[in-house]
Image (cartoon, rainbow, N blue to C red):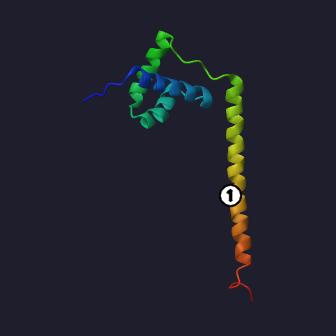
């Protein structure tokens, strides 16, 4: 049996889909497929709600360009930090094994 969603839930889905489209330059279908399962709706329903909101002109305000640019910069920085952390973990494991008394001759 179909579930009924209140307008707040529909608005949230539309906002998240539109944010994903703007932030990651995705198609509506890809954004709906990424967002909808996390919110407990089918991607078809999310697409339908988004299309209805666009036709009604009730799309939430887009993310300002400076905010989107900062978000992209922070994502790149976060990835660089993850890579550095992996490198440091590998280096510490290497040096820890060198200090192991069982390996010394």
> Front-most of 8 and 16?
8
As drawn, is 61 to the left or to the right of 78?
left
Residue 42 locus on image (x, y percent) = 38, 31
* Vertical order, 93 against 7 (above or below): below
* Vertical order, 57 against 29 (above or below): above
Residue 55 locus on image (x, y percent) = 47, 11
Rendered-image quadrant of the C terminus: bottom right
Furthest residue to the top? 56
* Vertical order, 46 against 101 (above or below): above
Residue 91 locus on image (x, y percent) = 73, 65
As drawn, is 72 to the left or to the right of 2?
right
| Labels in figure, total | 1
Residue 36 locus on image (x, y percent) = 44, 32
Could you tell me which residue is drawn at 46 percent across and 27 percent down? 13
User: What residue is shown with label 1?
Assistant: 86
What is the secondary structure assignment of the residue under circle 1?
helix
Count neighbours of disc 1 (C-alpha within 10 A) and say few if under 14, some if 14 to 19, many if 20 or more. Answer: few
As drawn, is 85 to the left or to the right of 2?
right
Furthest residue to the bottom? 105
């Amino acid at each position: 049996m179909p579930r009924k969603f209140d307008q707040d839930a529909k608005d949230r889905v539309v906002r998240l889909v539109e944010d994903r489209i703007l932030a990651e330059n995705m198609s509506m279908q890809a954004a709906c497929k990424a967002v909808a399962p996390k919110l407990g709706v089918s991607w078809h329903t999310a697409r339908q709600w988004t299309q209805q909101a666009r036709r009604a002109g009730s799309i939430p305000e887009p993310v300002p360009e400076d905010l989107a640019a900062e978000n992209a910069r922070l994502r790149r920085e976060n990835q660089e930090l993850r890579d550095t952390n992996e490198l440091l973990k590998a280096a510490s494991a290497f040096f820890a094994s060198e200090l192991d008394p069982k390996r010394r001759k």
